[in-house]
Image (spheres, grey):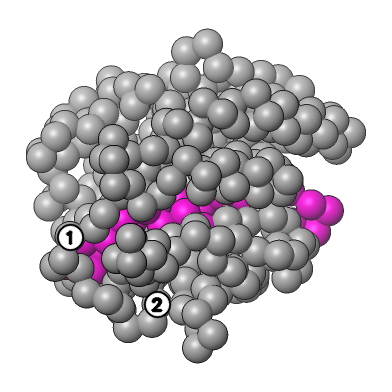
Amino acid sequence: MDPALPKLLQFDRFALDLTRERLRAGDQEIALRPKAFEVLRHLAENAGRLVSKRELFEVVWPNVAVTDDSLVQCIRELRDKLGDTDHLLIETVPRRGYLLNVGHPRAAKEHDSLPPPERSQTPIVGSPGRRLVLWSPVQRKRASLATAAITICCLAAAGYLTAHLWLPSSANALFTEDDARRITAIAAEKELPLPPFQISRIGRGVLPEHRRFVGIWVSSTGFVNSNRQFMLVITGAEPSGIVTGFTVRGPPRALSLVVKPAGATHFKARVLGDSFRYSGPNSEREVVMTADRRLEFNEVFDTGVIVRVALDPVWALVEAEQKAALW
C-alpha cells in the first residue's frame, strides 16, 4: 500500500480500516476472507477507476497461478456482504475488469481506526431500499422459522411451474417431466429451495470421467455434524473438464456452522481425477466420487473446522443416456 494513503478509507456505505484489516458497514463489523479483503482494498484505493483483472491478480495473487474463479468468488463474497445485489457498487466491465462506484474516500486522519463493534439495533444500509439489522437471538430464531415456512409454501406453489422451466426444448430430453416432478417432490420434502435449471445432452467431446458427475445428488440424513439437508445439482460438463451446477442448502439446524437461510449457490470447478474443488465464502469445498459411485461433499472453513455430507444420485446423466440408447 502507498504510505501516503490514509490508514482509514471512509465511504458512504462502508469503511476500511487498513491497519486492522477490518470492514465496517454502519455499526456492523463484517468478516471477510483475507483474499476478498485484499481485492476490496485495491478497489477502494482505486475507487472510481477501472481496475483490470490482470492488475488484481498481480496485486492479490503475486507470483501465484490462479484461475478467474478465485477472483469471481472474491467479488461474489464482497457483493453479498455489502448488499450489492444489483452490482451497482462493484460494477463488472465485461472482458476488462471491475469498477468500485463509491467516489473518493473522505479525508481521515492517519491515526484513525474503526472503533470496536457494538451490538445495536441501528439499521445498516446496504443497497438502496435494503435495510439490515443486528437481531437478538430470539429475533433470529423467529426469522429462521419464518424462512422455513415461506420456503415450504413457495416450493408447493411453484413446483409445477419450475418443473416445466427445467425441461429442455428438445423432444429427446434426457431429463423428463416425470424426473422434474420427482426431484421437486424430494426437494419439497427436505425443504430445499431448488433454483431453475436445465439439463440436456452433453457433447461427445466430454470424457466419461467428467460426464459421470452430471446429475442430481441428495443426502439421506444431511451434514454429519448438524443433519442440515443438502443437494448438489450438477447441470453441465465441458470438454476442458469444467463442471457447473448448484449447491442447495436447506434451513439451518441447531448445530449448523453456516446459519444463513436456505438457498442455492452457483459454482464452477475443474475435475481432477475423482474430485473437483472450488472456493466459497469463508471456506474451501471439495467433492469426491467414491468407489460406490456416491459423492462426498467436504467443506473446510477458514477456522479449520471441517464438515461433510454423503450424497446419493437421484438422477444421473450416464444412466439417462444408457436408457435413451435402448429406446
Q: Taking 90 as reference, is 324 above or below it?
A: below
- The answer to which of 189 and 284 lies nearer the viewer is 189
| Camera-side mark, 2 or 1 | 1
The amino acid at mark 1 is Gly
Asked where in the image residue 202 lies, by quadrant, the reply is bottom left
The amino acid at mark 2 is Ser
Q: Which mark is residue 275?
A: 2
Residue 71 falls inside the magenta stretch = no
Q: Position of residue 41 (x, y in %)?
A: 34, 44
- The answer to which of 81 and 121 lies nearer the viewer is 81
Q: In the figure, is residue 158 to the left or right of 220? A: left
Residue at screen point 48% across, 66% down: 285
Residue at screen point 66% across, 49% down: 186
Query: Which residue, as the protein is rendered here, is positioned at the far front?
Result: 327
Q: Taking 268 as reference, is 12 above or below it?
A: above
Q: Which mark is residue 203?
A: 1
Q: In the figure, is residue 286 to the left or right of 299? A: left
